[in-house]
Image: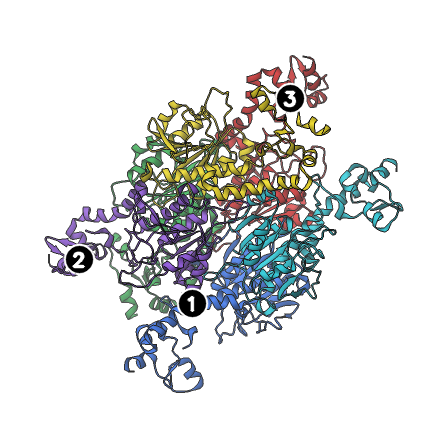
Chain colours: A red, B blue, C cyan, D purple, E yellow, F green
């Protein structure tokens, strides 16, 4: 079973959601840390401090990562901007968000404005591996203010931000054209305890189905759980792997009917 | 009796305060109105609207006018900035203010930043009549964005904003170098009912002292109320007027001792 | 293509929604303006002012218009009431609304109470053209307080409010039996810039589908977008118009199958 | 030592304050309880419930009792009104209060309005024993709605509310002209644990002064603590008691100089 | 017609919902009352009082009862915990909840922690009549603090809490092993007026369907309303009753087709 | 001039205040960082995360440091506790604080409770150099939970926390009996830019006095500014230094009279 493939009724991935939230929030914590001068940053406290210009934090994407990071950034009183192409997603998010979050449609004009004015850009947009374009190009780094930084939570190589490549907790940042990049690709591992609890919370109901009914019955009963089956009794059931490795595969739905 | 000269223990003017608050709030209402395209403005709703860049409203001064205007501007979700030279005033105001108000020290650099970025500048700073300098000079209007406007609640001729001169509710706005100016010098009169109630609330306790004790006894007992005495029994007691009109005057404190 | 006919998965009209929100919010701005004595109103600041009775603002309808107006009216600290017949709509709205909004079921008793006590009635309920009844009758205006006003955002002639008829930004108000009526039928045009941005945000994804795929393919692929087709290649596809004008029409779904 | 006579620098009574806060809050809890039909009330949940008219709770007095009760009443979403004669007290309170609290000047007109509309009147105003007038007269009870109730936290016989007389936790309510009165004169005793802790918190610093320095030295050093001395070494030092009982007394300040 | 069987599109019971909300909220009011020493409790004010340890209130279940009670408990500043097994329910609830509500997955470890630390446990979980297990066992009462109490809103005999049995408003509490239990099984009746209004609000649209169309047509048109039909023209249509009483029954859907 | 000795009218140090606020806030940022497993901590995200027990953060002291740290800790949804001996300070702070901050009187019983339950203890209490006692003793570390940590912002050697000794940004943490200690004695230097601005804001008005009037006149006019004079024209005027170094000194007040 691969729990990352299990879906819920809405086509979302309930077992990935908690990790995305922690990654987004951890992304803002990274910004808090690396904005300090002793850690290589411009020496700013990313908060609303009386008498001081309020920092601007921009999220690319209004998904779980972006809203997770925005929640914390706004809680400290920063001026937060979220860019997304989906008005409905933003309308829904705005209903429960504080006044210091601005939702802007994601287009080149708004992006450039945010690149020029922001202290931190946090990317939460996953990027299809075969896309050749980007949202932020290397050329765009020139628009950014001195000391501004990029946190890429999505961490796709050649992804939404052209200049991002995976880093690790041991060596988390690098600079391109003077702009700090933080691209740790497993941020939640920093919050091992919190992540374990929230992952267990999400996973347990599925485990209980398998424990209570036995694996086969659980697979039969729950179409959405079945989406996580990768192999059974020697038969590969995950199409994606089969295609990549050029191996035979058995459709899980068919398998369940006949076992 | 001139009630505008009565002071409280802290040296503030309790009978002017309600009018200042209404003037500041009315100043933001003027901005809401004149920012509409049908009223000569750029056609902006001064509020946080999903998908649209949030307007920026800057207050000059963190007094009753500035915080009154800021309270309403922030309530609509605008990005609000208050410029003042007094850190203690701003620290006190920030304790009860929402996250979308930024307090910045008033200096030339921050002023220019706000002039460039703001949709509305609201001035609440009274300016000594004999000062020759200004905070905002005519030259500075060039820094402002197309469609940006100035609301001067203080309305001092040659005051904090060089280009401001009194206007009236009948003819409230004019343009200088393409920048709309709203400088109605009696904003609270637009809220005649609200103003009457709040003014009566503030005035009544003083009237009651005079009604209960008689005028002379009230003057004797209350040093602060006495500050409002302008003349008595044919004797001018208001020094300011005496000096202006080159007339004799009697010190109120002395008068009270002997009457 | 008529974008006002495009629907989303829930049967709502995503391209009308932004205009409804602006209309509702603009309706409250109109109340703010015309409640001033210099503009013909009773001279009230529609806000929670210390020492002064808080104004009461009632919305007819808990849709996009009503909640949009309520959001701003509540932000200023007014006592806001929303009347609607749908408990689920109100339960959903209350989850994210501040404490100074009261949701009341819309019936004659509650309506009369609100008519008697409110400073402003804002109507956001669209009314079927063939209905002969009303929510508020001319007779009901007698219940209202001196100085109370009606803002009709829906602006249906012989609609929810019997005495409303369209007005314009040039001549926005009129009086019936001493009650001011504001019934501008295109409020959002006052916020031309904000409206343009938010309309573009909503429209662009649909335009992109047509630009990327070509018109015909886009029509074939997206059933909901197809609802906006009014004519193609000389054939009228909008049934409503055909019926009104007594002309032939072609069903869009059928057309798409065969072109 | 009588701790209720100790004052702080501002002339307030720091050892009485915690009890006043608990009394005010307990007053609202009494209203919550007795508004239930099973306890003799009209059967209302004193909270903002979707679809139901919001209850109105009025406080007489904006002191510790009134703001304590208002804090809880507003937290449940009721429409709260505070009547006071002091604008400065209300301006200060409003800075940190939610939007559903209205501050109104206390005069006959506003009082009558509140008597007519309120579900609960909570009195927190202490009344001088020798005053013959009242704020609320027996006659005024006729103005109140059926089912409306009075909670008198101050509990002065012939006090602010003419019809109030002390009751006990054992027999807490009575009716006058059909209006329920709750006038328990020691509300905080219901919260014995909370009261003990908060009273100890307030008292301890004074006890420590006496314990650390010895009684005499503490009296010498702290003028404000000395205000609580009632007798020493057989000498009565509390003037109020001496006058009442027609006994000799020794001025505490003088005593301290010579002992 | 049994209105408690009518469902909405999501399978929820719209005519039960208002009673559940009132029951949950009333459950917290019961805790407020019985936590007072004069009513048999430990003498605590269940609120955040300066200088005093904040009470802890735990809800079993994040449904309408649990969130209703939590809303009020959190409004008073208590530390509130909600235990539930469904992460999606808790994620949705958290979006609109204040910071002093903690959502924890319901498992034995978290339950024990809450039993040890809470001042009040409020149960809102309905329990299948045939379950033999419980969430809280009699043995668990030993974990609770002195003075801690249980409020069981669900009131299932041998239900989620082993030691709960129905009580009445006349005799609402009893003790098991020194722990106070409040298990009134019809809490909303205490709020007779509020309950009547909110129940009428929910019921009226269904009544109107039957009044407008006639009973038969209404049953035909509305599948969900039909779920409430118990008998018609002498025929029992409620399966549950038929099975219990071993009587014949007629399927309502079939009946409607042929009548 | 030593600006750290300049006082305001209330005896506070206006030029130290901004650094204390940054130190307190930076103290919480340190906790956020070192609570991560990759930085040596227990792997917790110090925030309110759905489904996970909320972390507990305790501040020793309700001054600028404690409230600064608490503001940020509470903004992330943690359960925050502030211990202080001064009820008035806590009453004032509570007026503007969110519901998830609890104020408890500082005594041994409450301290032990907090030591047992907290994830982070942040100390903001300065300790007189000659005191031999402590608030937290080495022995007390045994009470703390595994993974709990201490952040000492005050950083007094042998101060409020016995086991604290200064550390640096280069080597910020150490362990005593398994408990992590973070005691960087110049936290604000991490926020060099923010600190510079806020320090300049606070300092400038004093600099302007000296620049506008000349040093001597400024010293004569402003008694509070004069408190910062350390030497003039070869004469030492700072008593503290004179005593420490056993040198002669000149009283600044006397000097000003005669120069």
Marks 3 and 2: which is nearer the front?
2
Marks 3 and 1: which is nearer the front?
1
Residue in the image at 55% along x and 35% along y: E16
* Label 3 in the same subunit as label 2: no
For disc 3, the marked residue is A226
The 10 Å Cα crowd at callout 3, few under 14, some 14 to 19, many 20 or more, is: many
Looking at the image, can residue E17 be seen? yes
Do labels 3 and 1 touch, CB within 8 Å? Answer: no
Looking at the image, can residue F47 be seen? no
The 10 Å Cα crowd at callout 2, few under 14, some 14 to 19, many 20 or more, is: some
Marks 2 and 1: which is nearer the front?
2
Q: Position of residue C191 (x, y in %)?
A: 67, 58
Q: Using the image, determine if residue C187 lies above or below residue C62.
A: below
Between C27 and B131, the one lying in front of the other is C27
Q: Give the alpha-carbon distance from disc 3 to disc 1, as whole Å.
A: 73 Å
Do labels 3 and 2 touch, CB within 8 Å? Answer: no
Q: Position of residue A45 (x, y in %)?
A: 49, 47
Q: Using the image, determine if residue C105 lies above or below residue E210.
A: below
Q: Using the image, determine if residue D158 lies above or below residue E134.
A: below
Q: Position of residue C220 (x, y in %)?
A: 81, 37
For disc 1, the marked residue is B202
Q: Circle 1 — which element?
A: helix
- Residue D137 quadrant: bottom left
Between D132 and B84, the one lying in front of the other is D132
Residue in the image at 34% along x and 50% along y: F89
Q: Circle 3 — which element?
A: helix
For disc 2, the marked residue is D241
């Amino acid at each position: 079973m691969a729990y990352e493939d299990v879906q819920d009724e809405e086509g979302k991935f309930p077992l990935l959601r908690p990790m995305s939230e922690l990654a987004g929030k951890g992304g803002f914590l990274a910004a808090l840390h690396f904005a300090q001068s002793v850690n290589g940053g411009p020496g700013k406290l990313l908060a609303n401090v009386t008498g001081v210009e309020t920092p601007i934090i921009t999220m690319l994407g209004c998904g779980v990562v972006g809203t997770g990071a925005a929640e914390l950034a706004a809680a400290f009183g920063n001026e937060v901007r979220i860019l997304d192409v989906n008005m409905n997603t933003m309308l829904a998010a705005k209903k429960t968000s504080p006044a210091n979050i601005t939702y802007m449609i994601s287009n080149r004009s708004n992006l450039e404005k945010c690149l020029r004015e922001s202290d931190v850009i946090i990317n939460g947009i996953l990027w299809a591996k075969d896309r050749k374009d980007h949202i932020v190009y290397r050329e765009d780094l020139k628009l950014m203010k001195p000391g501004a930084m990029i946190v890429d939570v999505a961490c796709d190589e050649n992804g939404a931000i052209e200049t991002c490549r995976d880093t690790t907790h041991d060596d988390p940042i690098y600079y391109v054209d003077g702009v700090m990049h933080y691209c740790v690709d497993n941020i939640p591992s920093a919050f091992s305890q919190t992540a374990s609890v929230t992952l267990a919370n999400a996973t347990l109901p599925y485990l209980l189905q398998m424990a209570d009914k036995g694996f086969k019955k659980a697979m039969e009963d729950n179409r959405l759980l079945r989406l996580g089956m990768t192999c059974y009794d020697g038969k590969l059931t995950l199409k994606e792997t089969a295609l990549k490795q050029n191996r035979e595969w058995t459709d899980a739905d068919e398998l369940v009917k006949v076992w």
